[in-house]
Amino acid sequence: MLLAYYLYKRKQNNANKLNLITLLIGWMIASGITLACLFGLYHQKLSLVASSFYNALNHLGFAFGLAWVIFVCITGQAGAVNGILSWKAWIPLSRLTFCAYLIHPIVIFAYYSSMKRLIEFNHINMVMSYFGFLIISYAAAAVTSLLFESPVIRLERLLRDKLINFLQR
């Protein structure tokens, strides 16, 4: 919300683009904070106070990093990052993301409920599980979207068009 307010005020004031030094410093700070939020606990044994601070500030720091990416993309200064995030191939996946988010706990629960014995933890097993859950969740999301979401959207569009035509008479 603060970013949206700042962008609104910036647009009202016709602010100039950021200079290269400011962009580099912003990218370094945002990247550092975001990476610390993601990988900061790797091979670390934190005290109770340090864990409390990490848990309290982790989401805020990650949100700051994402806010920087959003800011530079909206102001047209993100370069290749904006090109990657604006790639047209992401559109179908973006439409399935919320449905996949809702379905993936069911997929994970079904998988682990069907297991007869414990699995050994190692990086290969975790990577394979991750990609398996990802693909199955998106496939189930595509089926669910085609069966439920798309017909409702088409029906809503049809009713809206009929209502608009009726009101224009």
Image (cartoon, rainbow, N blue to C red):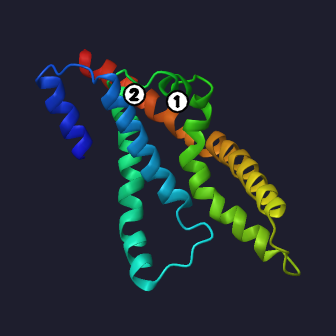
Numbered mark located on residue 85 in the image: 1
Say which residue appears at 57% left-offset and 23% top-offset.
87
Left or right: where does residue 60 sit relative to residue 37? left
Residue 165 lies, with reference to residue 103, above or below; the image says above
Q: Which of 148 and 83 lies nearest the eye of the viewer?
A: 83
State the SS at label 1.
Answer: helix
Say which residue appears at 56% left-offset and 42% top-offset.
149
Say which residue appears at 62% left-offset and 43% top-offset.
145
The x and y percentages for residue 137 are 70, 52
Q: Are marks 2 and 1 in contact (CB under 8 Å)?
A: yes
Q: Which residue is mark 2?
A: 73
Return the residue found at the far top: 169
Whether residue 150 is visible to the viewer of this picture, yes or no, is no
The x and y percentages for residue 138 are 69, 46
What's the CA distance linking mark 2 and mark 1?
A: 9 Å
Q: Amino acid at mark 2?
A: Cys
State the SS at label 2.
Answer: helix
